[in-house]
Amino acid sequence: MATVELTFSALPAHVRTARLVATAIARRTGVEESLLDEVRLAVGEACSRAVEAHRVHCPGEPIRIELRDDSGRFEVTVSDQAPSEEIKQEQPLDLGMLSDSFMSNFGIAVIEGLADDVEVFPSPKGTNIRMSWPAAVPV
Amino acid sequence: MDLKLDHRTEDRLTIVEVEGEIDVYTAPRLRELLIDLVNKGNFHLLVNMEKVDFLDSTGLGVLVGGLKRVRAHDGSLELVCTQERILKIFRITGLTKVFGIYASVDEAKEAHGKDK
């Protein structure tokens, strides 16, 4: 098992860096080229969500990403330290429903639409989003 | 790649050209442009996303915000997009039902002309 860990301060500019690192490691781990866009977007969504949450609750605290090559899966965990309630699962039906607070949950909806294996663990001490994709079995 | 924005008005339609990445870092610039255009009386917007490399939910939120603003003036905000990786995000979130999405600027202009 190879693990890369990355911590960054809660600044929007760093989200792009996190996306690039995750995509580079996914490629090196053997994730199919056709899935790399999904990895890039899902990791970006998780990091954006974490940055927004930290900016509201704890702007001085860092956000952590773990990228793991684990038994033929490429696994990413994005962890923040902002208190979170249960995340509502809803689908937009009309424009009037799309308030700013509703839009903040869009990121989770996008991640769940992209990664075939996603777990979200919200808690008063922060949220962990774990997602994974198939990777080549190491030779 | 950073975000490049440009806009021009043809007839009553304001075409917003977007190039690069729309994410949590760059989306505020697109939001400011859309708000500025609406404040200046441009209520029919067409956002050309053919050169967008990356779009996340923050960008979707900006587009939805723009749509809400123009609708308040009986206007429209429609998109030009044929890139599958971008369209996929609209499908996942159900926003294909909210936005008019065209394959080219000409196609959108033609449809807009019929609506007048």
Image (spheres, rainbow, N blue to C red):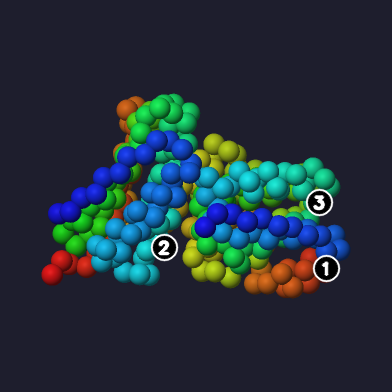
What residue is pinned by disc 2? A37
- For the image, the number of numbered tags is 3
**Residue nearest the observer in this picture, A21 or B68:** A21
**Residue nearest the observer in this picture, B109 or B4:** B4
Residue count near mark 3 (Cα–Cα under 10 Å), binned few <14, some 14–19, many ≥20: some
Quadrant containing the C terminus of chain A is: bottom left
The secondary element bearing badge 2 is classed as helix
Q: Are marks 3 and 1 in contact (CB under 8 Å)?
A: no
User: Left of B16 or right of it: where is A132?
Assistant: left
- Residue A21 position, x and y percent, is 35, 53
- The chain to which mark 2 is attached is A
What residue is pinned by disc 3? B42
Q: Is residue B91 visible?
A: no
User: Left of B13 or right of it: where is A36?
Assistant: left
- The answer to whether A114 is drawn above or below residue A47 in the figure is below
The secondary element bearing badge 1 is classed as helix
For residue B40, the mark is none
What residue is pinned by disc 1? B113
Which kind of residue does numbered mark 1 sit on? Gly
- The answer to whether A48 is drawn above or below residue B50 in the figure is above
First in sequence: mark 3 or mark 1? 3
Which kind of residue does numbered mark 2 sit on? Asp
Residue at 59 percent across and 54 percent down: it is B3
Q: Are marks 2 and 1 in contact (CB under 8 Å)?
A: no
Residue at 41 percent across and 63 percent down: it is A37
